[in-house]
Image (spheres, rainbow, N blue to C red):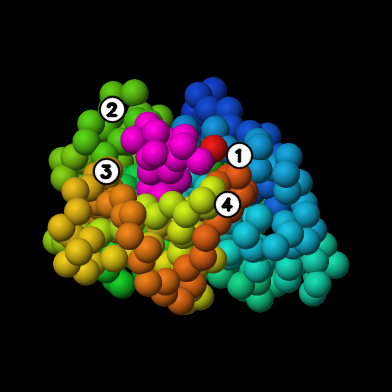
Amino acid sequence: MTDGTPHFNIHAFRNALVEWFRREGRDYPWRRTTDPWHILVSELMLQQTTIPTVLGRYDRWMRQFPTPAHLAAVDEQTALRSWEGLGYYRRVRSLQAIAREIVNEFGGRFPDNAEGLKRLPGIGPYTSGALLSFAFNKAAPIVDANVARVLARIDNYSVPVDSTEGQKYLWSRAESLVDPEHAREFNSAIMELGQTCCSISSPDCLLCPVRPFCSAERPETLPVKNPKPQVTRVEHHDILYIRGKSVLLAKCPEGKRHAGMYRFPQREDEHTLSLPHVLKQTYSITRYRVTRYIHHVTDTPLLREGEEFVPLDKIHGLPMASPDRKALNSPTLGKLLDHIR
Ligand code: SF4
C-alpha cells in the first residue's frame, strides 16, 4: 500500500511511527542533545561502527572535544590517536576539516540550512539530513541502510536499493514521508524501526507499529541489492625490530590509507619470509580479508622512507591503526618488549 493507494494515510503513518518511538525509542546520548556538533560527531562515529562500540567512546570524545574549536585546535596526530578503536580514519580527518571550517568561516556556529551545510567539507545528503532534522528539527530526509530497508518493505519495492534508480526513489520517498511537525522524532523513529522490528533477517511484523501501512509480501527478501564484490584474500608480512629501547615503526604517507598513523614496517623479501612469525592476525578491511604475519628480526634492516625508531614509552601517544595497536598490546609482542621496558 503506497501513498498512491486510498489505504495509505500519510498522517496516520507518521503518527503511528512517532507515537511508537515515544513509547519504545531507545535512549542514546546523542538523542539527548540538539547541539549540531554533538550530533555530527555521533553520526560520523556511527557510520561503519556499531552502536555498542560508539557508546563506549562517544562520551569520552565529547569530553575531550566538546566544541568544534577544541578539535580545530589540536594537531592531526592527537585527533587520530583519540579516534583509535573506531577505525575508518578518514572520518576523523573529515570531522577536523569541518571543525576548522566552522571556526574559521562560520564563527563557530553551524548553518541551519542545506545550502550552508553543503559548504562544509565532506557533508553529503545523509549527514546534512541528520543535522537538519536532529539538531534543527527541520523536515529533511535521511536514508541509511535501516531506513532503506523499512521503505523498501513498506512499498514492496524490488529495484536494487544501491542502484542509482533505487537511491533516487528512496530519497524522494523519505522526503515525502518525513513529518514536518516532528522531523527529529520521525527520522529517529524510522531508523529505530529498521534496527528493531524491521530487522534484516527476522522482521517482527506482528509488533510493528506501521504494519497496516506495509505492503511487503515477503519482507525477509527485501531490500534487493546488487551482488557484492567478492572477498579478496591478501597476506601481509611486517617486522618487529627492536634497537635499544626503541622499536622501528613506519609512518603511513599522505594520500594512503591510515595517513599520519604508525604501523609495523612491511617487508616482503625472501629473508623476512623465511623467518618464523611471532604473531599472526586476521582481519577484514572493506572487501579484503587480510592475514598478517609479524616476524621478529634481529639483523638491522635497511631503513625505508618514513621509518623511524620510536622509544617504547612514546608509542602509547602515537596514533596507530587497530591491528597494529592490538599487535603491540598482545602477550606475544609484550613478552619481547618487556626486555626493553
Ligand atoms: S510490517 Fe514488517 S516488513 Fe513491514 S515495516 Fe513493519 S516490520 Fe517491516
Q: Residue 311 bears which disc, if any?
A: 4
Query: Is 4 situated left or right of 105 in this image?
Result: left
Crowding near the residue tagged with mark 1, few <14, some 14–19, many ≥20 C-alpha atoms within 10 Å: some
Closer-to-camera residue (143/20) = 143
> In this picture, which residue range is highlighted in magenta?
322-340
Q: Earlier in the sequence, mark 3 or mark 4?
A: 3
Pointer 3: what residue? 278
Q: Residue at x 52, y 28 (%)?
A: 25
Whole-angstrom CA distance, mark 4 to mark 2, is: 55 Å
Q: Amino acid at mark 2?
A: Asp
Residue 28, relative to residue 263: is it above or below? above
Q: Residue at x 26, y 32 (%)?
A: 203
Pointer 2: what residue? 204
Check residue 335 for magenta coloring.
yes
Crowding near the residue tagged with mark 4, few <14, some 14–19, many ≥20 C-alpha atoms within 10 Å: some
Residue 54, relative to residue 241: is it above or below? above
Q: Determine the secondary structure under disc 1.
A: helix
Q: Earlier in the sequence, mark 4 or mark 2?
A: 2
Check residue 339 for magenta coloring.
yes
Q: Residue at x 65, y 68 (%)?
A: 97
